Image (spheres, helix red, strand yellow):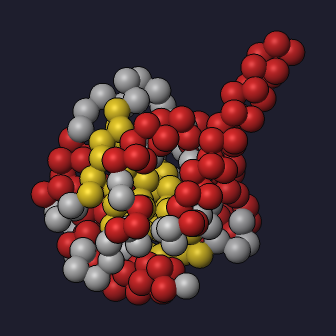
């Protein structure tokens, strides 16, 4: 067991070194980077499709689309208007790490970007431990999941700055309680900024877009 801990510390230490280099590159070019994390099926790609469609003429957005085996998400983002999309297939790994990001980052002309969005692999456990050089993590949860998710995966919600609750159009079709999930999340992270949206109906998306605009301006 002691050997396993030492190996993990060594891996994370190297990851943090690479992430610091990535962060420095992004800051030098004034690029804001967001690391999108969620369970599978929460709607990360759907939210990014809507975001691209709404902001592609205002902000220069680059996307890294992480996936375990396919480039399906990257293809969807290109169809939604993404002009700077790089797929990152992990080949089975359950998360992205900084070394993977260093492989695809040179494909972007950072001087032509305002915002870099990294769509992580669907998983609320492993991605919480890996810094990718982002400015902040955005955790997505949907109303088709349990409202106790923040309590079951506290590490992810503690390390995230923003929580997006998707599929609010489906509220009432299950026992999911909107106020309870927000209370659970703030029990873990009192500073968490929360958005309530529906990618299907568009409800709440304008507030999300405005926040992204302001983030880039700042």
Position of the N terminus by quadrant: top right
Image x and y of residue 106, in percent: 40, 46
Regarding residue 46, the answer to whether it shows in the image is no
Image x and y of residue 38, in percent: 47, 51
Q: Quadrant of residue 28?
A: bottom right
Front one among 142 and 89: 89
Position of the C terminus by quadrant: bottom right
Residue name at image x 72 percent, y 66 percent: 189
Residue name at image x 13 percent, y 57 percent: 79
View extreme (left): residue: 79
Up the image or down, 62 lies above or below 213; here it is: above
Q: Quadrant of residue 10?
A: top right
Up the image or down, 127 lies above or below 58; here it is: above
Residue name at image x 56 percent, y 40 percent: 98
The answer to whether residue 54 is left or right of residue 35 is left
Regarding residue 56, the answer to whether it shows in the image is yes
Q: Quadrant of residue 88?
A: top left
Up the image or down, 133 lies above or below 182; here it is: above
Front one among 83 and 173: 83
Image x and y of residue 156, in percent: 63, 51
Image x and y of residue 2, in percent: 86, 15
Residue name at image x 35 percent, y 68 percent: 112
The answer to whether residue 189 is left or right of residue 163 is right
Front one among 121 and 170: 121
Callout count: 0
């Amino acid at each position: 067991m002691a050997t396993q801990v030492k190996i993990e510390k060594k891996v994370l230490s190297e990851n943090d070194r690479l992430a610091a280099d990535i962060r420095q590159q992004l800051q030098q070019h004034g690029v804001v980077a967001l690391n999108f994390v969620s369970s599978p099926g929460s709607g990360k790609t759907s939210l990014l499709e809507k975001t691209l469609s709404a902001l592609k003429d205002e902000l220069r957005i680059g996307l890294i689309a992480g996936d375990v085996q396919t480039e399906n998400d990257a293809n969807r983002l290109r169809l939604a208007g993404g002009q700077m999309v790089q797929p990152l297939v992990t080949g089975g790994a359950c998360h992205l790490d900084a070394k993977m990001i260093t492989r695809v980052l040179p494909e972007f002309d950072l001087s032509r970007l305002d915002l870099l969005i990294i769509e992580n692999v669907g998983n609320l456990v492993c991605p919480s431990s890996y810094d990718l050089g982002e400015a902040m993590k955005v955790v997505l949860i949907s109303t088709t999941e349990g409202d106790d998710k923040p309590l079951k995966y506290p590490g992810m919600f503690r390390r995230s700055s923003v929580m997006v609750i998707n599929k609010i159009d489906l509220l009432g079709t299950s026992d999911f309680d909107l106020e309870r999930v927000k209370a659970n999340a703030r029990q873990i992270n009192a500073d968490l900024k929360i958005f309530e949206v529906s990618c299907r109906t568009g409800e709440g998306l304008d507030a999300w877009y405005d926040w992204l605009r302001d983030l880039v301006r700042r």
